[in-house]
Image (cartoon, helix red, strand yellow):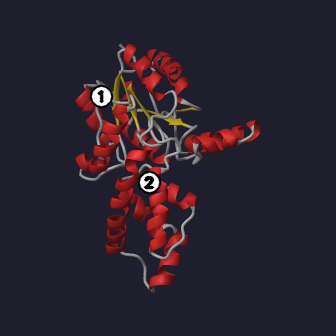
Amino acid sequence: MNKVEGVIFDWAGTAVDFGCFAPVNVFIDIFKNAGIDVTMEEARAPMGMLKIDHIREMLSMPRISALWEEKYGRAFNEQDVEKLYAKFEPALMASLSEYTDPIPEVIETVQVLRNQGLKIGSTTGYTKTMMDVVVPNALKKGYSPDFYVTPDETNSYGRPYPYMIYRNMEQLKLSASWKVVKVGDTTSDIKEGINAGVWSVGVIIGSSEMGLSLDEFNALSESEQEAAISKTDHSFKQSGADFTIQSMSEFPQLIEKINHLLSEGKRPNVR
């Protein structure tokens, strides 16, 4: 049958941790402690990548790179990346359990998908050690995919490489990439989906890409909310997303739409 067989969700900013705040605050802190003030936007830009790759990516940004040279009299090196990461991991681990609340509509949507016979997989930018905190805490609160993979299990080739998606497909016995949908909240999620040849979907409200907490989003006027949604939608589409959804409640309807496209012989990421 030409139908979607499985959905692969990202974790923070997609399934749990509205706005993806757990890692962002820690990235800002470790750079501050190294004498470099980074902005929220800079800290969020590489979101979704394996966390050590994220730090390397931040250090490679022209403004941060220049500040580093100014402070230390030399360009950053791999030792600097490792030192920053050594500070990052314990700081994140200390607060991670507080950022495991499922995002509104996720639990209900996953139940709808399961009732339709779909398998639920997941990929993440977190390491196995981090997921050992996130997974049981999310489970207590009602969210649990059928399977999850971390970059530790793909030789540290995290996003935008497609290997975590392939591991999900293998484990969940999904028969073809075009019968799989990847849902995420960052541009690296979108690229991971494209590189794996699956349908790539960006979820807007609660995303790291939007970067607002639930209270901050709710405090916006209707026109401000629309502007934030539109900007995030544009960013995902620029990165090559097949579709975007504002929130998870729209997702079952999108699955129907994709099933219809598949029945017509359409495939993902065809530009």
Q: Quick check: 223 left or right of 28? A: right
Specify few, some or many for label 1: CA neighbours under 10 Å numbering under 14, 14-19, or 20 or more: few
The answer to which of 70 and 142 lies nearer the viewer is 142
Disc sitting over residue 23 in the figure: 2
- Residue at 51% x, 27% y is 105
Q: CA distance from mark 1 to mark 2?
A: 24 Å
Please say if 92 is above or below 136: below
Between residue 81 and residue 40, name the one nearer to us: 40
Q: Is residue 63 left or right of residue 30?
A: right
Which residue in the protein does label 1 denote? 146
Proximity of marks 1 and 2: CB atoms separated by less than 8 Å: no
Percent of width and height locating residue 77: 36, 75
* Amino acid at pointer 1: Asp
Residue 6 sits in which quadrant?
top left
- Residue at x 45%, y 30% (from the top left corner): 268
Outermost residue, bottom side: 73
Amino acid type for the residue under numbered disc 2: Pro
User: Is residue 160 something one can see in this rendering?
Assistant: no
Image position of 166 (left or right of 105): left
Which numbered marker is on residue 120?
none
- Residue 76: image x %, image y %? 40, 76
Residue drawn at x 53%, y 44% is: 19
Of badges 1 and 2, nearer the viewer stands 2
Rendered location of residue 156, percent (x, y): 28, 53
Q: Does residue 23 lie above or below 18 as drawn?
A: below
Callout 2 crowding tier (Cα within 10 Å): few <14, some 14–19, many ≥20: many
- Per the image, label 2 sits on a secondary structure element best described as helix
Q: Quadrant of the N terminus?
A: top left
Q: Which mark sits nearer the N-terminus, 1 or 2?
A: 2
- Establish if 1 lies above or below 176: above
